[in-house]
Amino acid sequence: MDETIAMLRARGIQPTQQRVAVLRHILKVMEHLSADEVLAQVRRECPMISRATVYNTLNLLVRKDLLRTQILKEGTVVFDRNVSPHHHFIDEASGRIYDIPWSALKVSGEKSLEGYEIREYQVVMRGRRRGQK
């Protein structure tokens, strides 16, 4: 059985042709894509797929914990296939978003927020290579 179809079925998702196409694309790229970027790229293989189908599929994949949403680009939600805890680095010159392993950074101070139960946190770093403008 196809791995993508098996992943969908394991999460209780009916594997339609459109859902399979969206998930296959997400799994094959290492980028954090917006819904419009996913739409443009999936349309190359499935020209008749609608915007609503892509958006609905992405949101379903988020609800079923196959993707996470992140607001890492100004005003844009991107979809992250890495659902395990990790941090991000955004290259300001290219706009590319990189995953940083959780263990690569030490964060302190979360225990000092008395009265709050910290459910989740992540560090988002922004920068560019030295010498780039």
Image (spheres, helix red, strand yellow):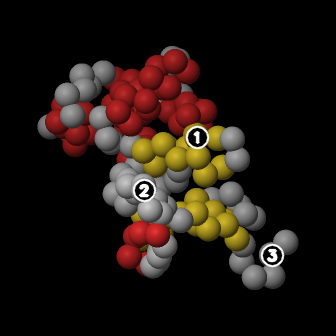
Mark 3 lies on a secondary structure that is loop
Residue type at mark 3? Gln
Badge 2: residue crowd in 10 Å (few <14, some 14–19, many ≥20): few
Residue 81: x percent and y percent? Answer: 40, 49
Q: Which one is closest to the eye, mark 2 or mark 3?
A: 2
Mark 2 and mark 3 residues within 8 Å of each other at the beta carbon: no
Point 70% across, 71% down: residue: 127
Q: Considering depth in this image, is 52 or 43 the residue closer to the camera?
A: 52
Tell me if residue 40 comes above or below residue 100 in the rendering.
Answer: above
Point 58% across, 40% down: residue: 77
Residue 19 quadrant: top left
Point 70% across, 47% down: residue: 74
Residue 89: x percent and y percent? Answer: 58, 66
Badge 1: residue crowd in 10 Å (few <14, some 14–19, many ≥20): some
Mark pair 2, 3: CA separation: 43 Å
Residue type at mark 2? Gly
Residue type at mark 1? Val
Q: Is residue 109 left or right of residue 5?
A: right
Tell me if residue 124 comes above or below residue 15 in the rendering.
Answer: below
Return the mark for residue 132: 3
Residue, disc 2: 115
Residue, disc 1: 77
Residue 124 quadrant: bottom right
**Mark found first going from the N terminus, 2 or 3:** 2
Badge 3: residue crowd in 10 Å (few <14, some 14–19, many ≥20): few
Mark 1 lies on a secondary structure that is strand
Mark pair 1, 2: CA separation: 30 Å
Q: Considering depth in this image, is 8 or 25 the residue closer to the camera?
A: 8
Mark 2 lies on a secondary structure that is loop
